[in-house]
Structure formats: C-alpha cells, structure tokens
C-alpha cells in the first residue's frame, strides 16, 4: 500500500478535479503490475496496473489507495475491470466519499466474489487526497488560504505596497502550490492594486481557473487577467443584473457569475457552492486582506499556508493578513494546529474542528 501511495503522488497537480490514485498488483509475493492516474481524462491507476499485469492478475491481490470507481466518466469504471481480471482480493486504503462511488465499487467487487479490505495506511491515503476528500464530502471546494507575511503578520504598507515581502524562491513555491488546486481566488482590490496574472508554474497542462470576487464589476477590460481570459479561464463573481460592461467582458472571454444579491458583499457560502457545482474541487485563496478575513470569519477554509519573511514592518495602519471587523473576544479566534513541515519556505496550518 505504501508503494500505491507513492505512485499516486506522481499525479499531484495533473489529475484535478479527480483524486490521485496509485495501484499495485501482487501475486505470490511479487509485484506483477503497477500504475497511477497520470492526468484527468487518462487511464485510471487500476486499468494501467491490470494492463501491465495481464494474465498474471488472476489470483493476485490488488492494492489501491482509494476505492475503485463504479461509475462512467471520461473513462470506463474500474471496479468491473478489476472483477473481470480474476483478481482474488482488493485492499483499499479508503472508501471513496464521492456520492457517485460511495461504497459501490467495493460492493460490486464483493458481488463478483472478490474479497475486499479497507483501512490499510488510511491516514497516509487521506493526506495525499485531502483536497478531493473534502470537496466530495462538503459539496464545496477545499479552500487553502495563502498569505505572504512579515514576522509581525503584515502583508502591505498602509498605501498597499507589498512587492516584495517574500523571496523569489518563496514566490516560486507559491506558484507550485497553486498547481495542486483547480484555481486561485482573489478580491478585486488585489486585482486593481497589482494587476496580476495569477497563473501557476508553466508545466500545468490542465485548465487552471482564476476567480475574482468583484461585486461592483470594477475589473478593467485592459487588465492582464482579462487580456489572458481566452488562454486561461477567468471567472468574475459579481452581483446584480448583467450590464453592458459585463457583456463586454464576456465578449473578451470572461465568465461572469451573478450572485443572487443586489448589494453588499458576495455571500461566500453561496459562491463556494456555485464554484463547486461548476467543477472546482479545490481553491487557493490569495487575498487581499479583506477577502482572507471574510473566509476566516466564515470559518470557510481547510488549510492555511503562511509564507513568512524575516522582516518586521510595524505601524498601526499596515495591513494585516486577515482583515475585516475587529473580534470581540479571544474566544472568537479560530484555533489552529500545525501541518507537516514543508521545508520549502512556508508553513501549513489546519483549523482545529
């Protein structure tokens, strides 16, 4: 199973929104076939491993880090292929919480006379597919909040100057971190201040979505985001009825998403459900301060990545990473616990729930 998890990791960043899956087939103590899911729309891990094993799969044990699927998507379901191969036993680290699977793959195998076992190296398997598992269970994207901060928790001067708090190496790691997600989200303030492109590292071959929260549709048609909308998907979440400017942006390749409110902030729970329904299973939220603060207040996040710079900015009006209204008491704080040490210029933290 550990080898299956290692193989699954090779697909990180390329299988989205599908999970990463590795598979190993063992017969009489020897590996006779192995494989992993390399890209969305490509062959699944079980199919690759079975093809390599051929007739040697008969009577063997198949190890996989996630329950074999039993539904058709862009590729045929895996569970019937496994059952037809003559595999005698299937060991899965986890059941798939996706409602399209949710135990059906294992049930199909049992009906075919295949012995099944679940739970081997479950923690390791959950860690490698945490984005997929949260989105499947919660019907919203897995949300990572990312902030580049000084030692005193600031992200910009009072005038909004933030280039550059972190080092070039840390910024490269941030682009690599984007690669693990289906898209990145920022507020319109960040777009107006920085005119960013919000792209991941160049080797990402699948669609990567840029999402902007822009309640009053202030984004400029001349911005770099809009100029690149036909090359990389750009979704702008706004509100109210479509306007002439919205139609202009849509003609330039922008996808406008109109929230069911006419004024005030865009409701984040609604926005997350809408993005999930449109196919985004994981989202990296990069600011600015008010947007990060809004996700914090809603407790609408699953992980925090802090890129700390060895500087102190100070000042009463310097922007904190998480803005918004002041809390009333310490009890309003979101308790966190540390994730694994990445050793790549940032820290991972998880909410304690």
Image (cartoon, grey):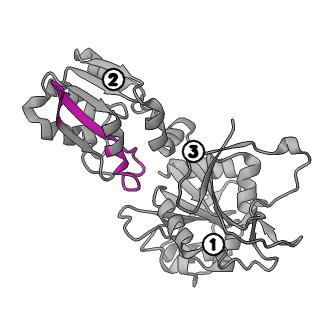
Q: What residue sits right under mark 3 in the picture?
A: 140
Position of 231 with respect to 306 (left or right) is left
- Locate residue 130, reporting x and y percent: 50, 42
**Residue closest to the eye, 340 or 178:** 340
Check if mark 2's residue and mark 1's residue have beta carbons within 8 Å.
no
Mark nearest the camera among 2 and 1 is 1
Q: Is residue 293 above or below residue 51?
A: below
Check if mark 2's residue and mark 3's residue have beta carbons within 8 Å.
no
Position of 202 with respect to 308 (left or right) is left
Q: Earlier in the sequence, mark 3 or mark 1?
A: 3
Q: What residue sits right under mark 1 in the picture?
A: 166
Q: Earlier in the sequence, mark 2 or mark 1?
A: 2
- Identify the residue shown where x is 67% and y is 69%: 309
Q: Earlier in the sequence, mark 2 or mark 3?
A: 2
- Locate residue 120, reporting x and y percent: 39, 26
**Residue closest to the eye, 42 or 175:** 175
Q: What residue sits right under mark 2 in the picture?
A: 106
Disc 2, SS: helix
Neighbours of disc 1 within 10 Å: few (<14), some (14-19), many (20+): some
22 in magenta? yes
Whole-number angstrom distance, CA of label 2 to CA of label 3: 25 Å
Rendered-image quadrant of the N terminus: top left
- Identify the residue shown where x is 20% and y is 25%: 83
Disc 3, SS: loop
- Locate residue 122, reporting x and y percent: 45, 30
**Residue closest to the eye, 323 or 56:** 56
User: Magenta region: which residues?
Assistant: 7-32
- Identify the residue shown where x is 36% and y is 30%: 67
- Locate residue 225, reporting x and y percent: 54, 76
């Amino acid at each position: 199973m550990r080898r299956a998890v290692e193989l699954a990791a090779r697909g990180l960043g390329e299988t989205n929104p599908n999970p990463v899956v590795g598979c190993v087939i063992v017969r009489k103590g020897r590996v006779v076939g192995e494989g992993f899911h390399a890209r969305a729309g490509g062959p699944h891990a079980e199919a690759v491993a079975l093809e390599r094993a051929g007739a040697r799969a008969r009577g063997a044990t198949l190890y996989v880090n996630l329950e074999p699927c039993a539904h058709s998507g862009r590729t045929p379901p895996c569970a019937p292929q496994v059952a037809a191969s003559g595999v005698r036993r299937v060991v899965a680290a986890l059941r798939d919480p996706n409602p399209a699977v949710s135990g059906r793959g294992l049930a199909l195998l049992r009906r075919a006379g295949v012995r099944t076992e679940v739970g081997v190296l479950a923690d390791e398997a959950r860690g490698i597919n945490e984005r997929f598992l949260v989105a499947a269970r919660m019907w919203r994207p897995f949300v990572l909040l990312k902030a580049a901060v000084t030692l005193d928790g600031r992200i910009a001067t009072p005038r909004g100057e933030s280039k550059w708090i972190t080092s070039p190496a840390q910024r490269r790691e941030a682009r690599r971190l984007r690669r693990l997600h289906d898209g990145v989200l920022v507020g319109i303030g960040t777009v107006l201040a920085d005119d960013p492109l919000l792209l991941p590292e160049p080797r990402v071959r699948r669609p990567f979505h840029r999402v902007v929260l822009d309640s009053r549709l202030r984004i400029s048609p001349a911005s770099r985001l809009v100029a690149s909308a036909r090359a990389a998907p750009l979704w702008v979440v706004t509100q109210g009825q479509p306007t002439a400017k919205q139609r202009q942006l849509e003609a330039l390749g922008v996808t406008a998403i109109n929230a069911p409110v006419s004024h005030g902030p865009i409701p984040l729970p609604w926005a997350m459900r809408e993005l999930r329904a449109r196919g985004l299973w994981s989202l990296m939220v990069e600011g600015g301060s008010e947007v990060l603060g809004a996700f914090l207040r809603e407790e609408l996040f699953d992980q925090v990545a802090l890129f700390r710079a060895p500087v102190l900015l100070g000042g009463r009006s310097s922007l904190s990473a998480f803005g918004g209204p002041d809390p009333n008491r310490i009890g309003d704080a979101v308790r966190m616990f540390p994730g694994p040490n990445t050793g790549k210029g940032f820290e991972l933290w998880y909410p304690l729930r």
